[in-house]
Amino acid sequence: MVKRFKKWRYPKIEEGKLTKWNWMVQHNEGLKLGRETDIGAFTYINAKNGVVIEDRAQVASHCSIYSVSTIDGKKGKVVLKKNCRIGSHSVIMPGVTIGENSIIGAFSFVNKNIPSNVIVAGVPARVIRKITYTKSR
């Protein structure tokens, strides 16, 4: 457990109202929130068709996560896998899954699935490089 999450508690989420940390969910019955998640202020989540945010996922401030788009009629569940991180002001579109440990750069527009262990950024978001892990001694 990360020290800053030692006292983590499931947040009180009321339909269409800001949480204590100033982020909002519409259709909150469609949101499945994992443990030790971190969602930044002024983030908007539309969970009409389902949004799953797995354990230890981080969403920075001012992000938008949509399970439905009124512009083009797309709809579908959004899944943020374990340990992924979404940079500030990013937009996640309907039907997208972001893989474990992946990092989305700030101000990115994500309209396709993102594999695990990559860094992506841009409009639209594209893979910049793979993340490699080495064992510490």
Image (cartoon, rainbow, N blue to C red):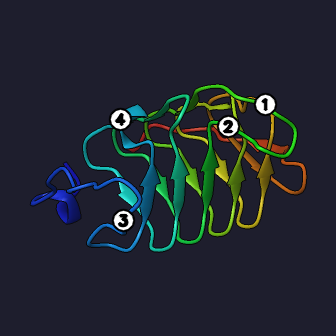
Mark 3 residue type: Lys
The residue tagged with tag 1: helix, strand or loop? loop
**In the figure, residue 62 lies in which quadrant?**
bottom right
Q: Quote the CA–CA distance across marks 1 and 3.
A: 25 Å
Q: Quote the CA–CA distance across marks 3 and 4.
A: 14 Å
Q: Where does the image place residue 55, in percent across and percent down from the top left?
A: 34, 38
Residue at position x 75%, y 41% in the image: 69
Judging by the rendered image, the residue that carries numbered circle 3 is: 17
Judging by the rendered image, the residue that carries numbered circle 4 is: 29
Tally of numbered tags: 4
Q: Residues within 10 Å of mark 2 (few under 14, many from 20)?
A: many
Judging by the rendered image, the residue that carries numbered circle 2 is: 68
Q: In this view, does 130 lie above or below 6?
A: above
Who comes first in sequence, dot 4 or dot 1?
4
Whether the residues at callouts 2 and 1 have beta carbons within 8 Å, the answer is yes
Q: Quote the CA–CA distance across marks 3 and 2.
A: 19 Å
Who comes first in sequence, dot 2 or dot 1?
2
Residue at position x 71%, y 55% in the image: 91
Mark 2 residue type: Val
Q: Is residue 110 left or right of residue 2?
A: right
Q: Quote the CA–CA distance across marks 4 and 1.
A: 20 Å
Judging by the rendered image, the residue that carries numbered circle 1 is: 74
Q: How crowded is mark 1: few (under 14 residues within 10 Å), some or many (20 or more)?
A: few
Quadrant of the rendering where the C terminus is positioned: top left
Mark 4 residue type: Glu
Mark 1 residue type: Lys
Residue at position x 35%, y 53% in the image: 15
Q: Where does the image place residue 67, in percent across and percent down from the top left?
A: 62, 36
Q: Quote the CA–CA distance across marks 4 and 2.
A: 15 Å
Q: Is residue 4 left or right of residue 86?
A: left
Q: In this view, does 109 lie above or below 97?
A: below
